[in-house]
Image (spheres, rainbow, N blue to C red):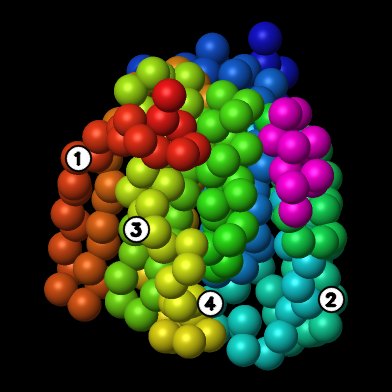
Amino acid sequence: MLTSNEQLRYSRQIMLDKIGEEGQVKLRNASVLIVGMGGLGNPVSMYLAAAGVGKLIIADGDQIDVTNLQRQVLFTEQDIQQNKAECAAEKLQQNNSDVEIEVIDEMMDEELCQYYIAQVDVVIDCSDNIATRYLVNRVCVEQQKPFVMGAATGFDGQQLVVDPRKPDSACYHCLFPASEKAPAQNCQTVGILGPVLAMIAGLQALQTIKLLTDIDVKYNQLNLYDGFNNQWQQFSLNKQSQCRVCGK
């Protein structure tokens, strides 16, 4: 049951037939790991905290830099040189004191991934590091945890849901089997517009809320956003039997 304060606070969500009070309780009881608290992690965490997700674990080992302020909307000039995850946790707690927030103030490695992914219902990749993305994807497949990937550079973004609980779900490695050795393409090397990140982050947050409330999510669909022409495209994926991560 929801408290009277929760019923009032989340009333605009609860009135949706697909959410209702039962869905709001599911959100309250859920836990999510967000890897990366940059241009994607900022709005993703804001939307999930505002929606009443019960526990957020946020991970980032970087410090806030002046170049981050153009797109990382939780941070201000006064926050420069603070750890991103610690600073974000403070701001998110101000928005919703009922949400439990745990901070990982370092970059995710094998040990941290194995430990924390086991504790949550959904994992969201908001990193700009492809090695981290491959690591998180692999551990999510191993532990059968839904994985919501997002990435953006320039005017373009992409989003994918991997759901290892589904036998036919493709994983990130199915989509990009050879990209681990590819040159890094991120905001530092290509540039980025903040609103493009907001588009992808909003979709990541939406997909996560749907997963947590048992609303059907299309998991073999790559969503591509072209911000220059304001167009979305969807591509269907197939699980690759020879994938060394999820193929059996």
Query: In which quarter of the view is residue 185 placed?
Result: bottom left
Confirm or deny contact between disc 4 and disc 1 (CB under 8 A): no
Magenta highlight range: 109-119
Q: Position of residue 24 (x, y in %)?
A: 57, 22
Q: Nearer the viewer, residue 75 or 178?
A: 178
Helix, strand or loop at label 4? It is loop
The alpha-carbon separation of the residues under discs 3 and 2 comes to 29 Å
The alpha-carbon separation of the residues under discs 3 and 4 comes to 17 Å
User: To which residue does mark 1 refer?
Assistant: 236
The alpha-carbon separation of the residues under discs 2 and 4 comes to 16 Å
Q: Nearer the viewer, residue 149 or 29?
A: 149
User: To which residue does mark 3 refer?
Assistant: 158
Amino acid bearing label 2: Gln
User: To which residue does mark 2 refer?
Assistant: 82
The alpha-carbon separation of the residues under discs 4 and 1 comes to 30 Å
Mark earlier in primary sequence (4, 1):
4
Helix, strand or loop at label 2? It is loop
Amino acid bearing label 1: Ser
Q: Residues within 10 Å of mark 4 (few under 14, many from 20)?
A: many
Would you say 67 lies left or right of 224 here?
A: right
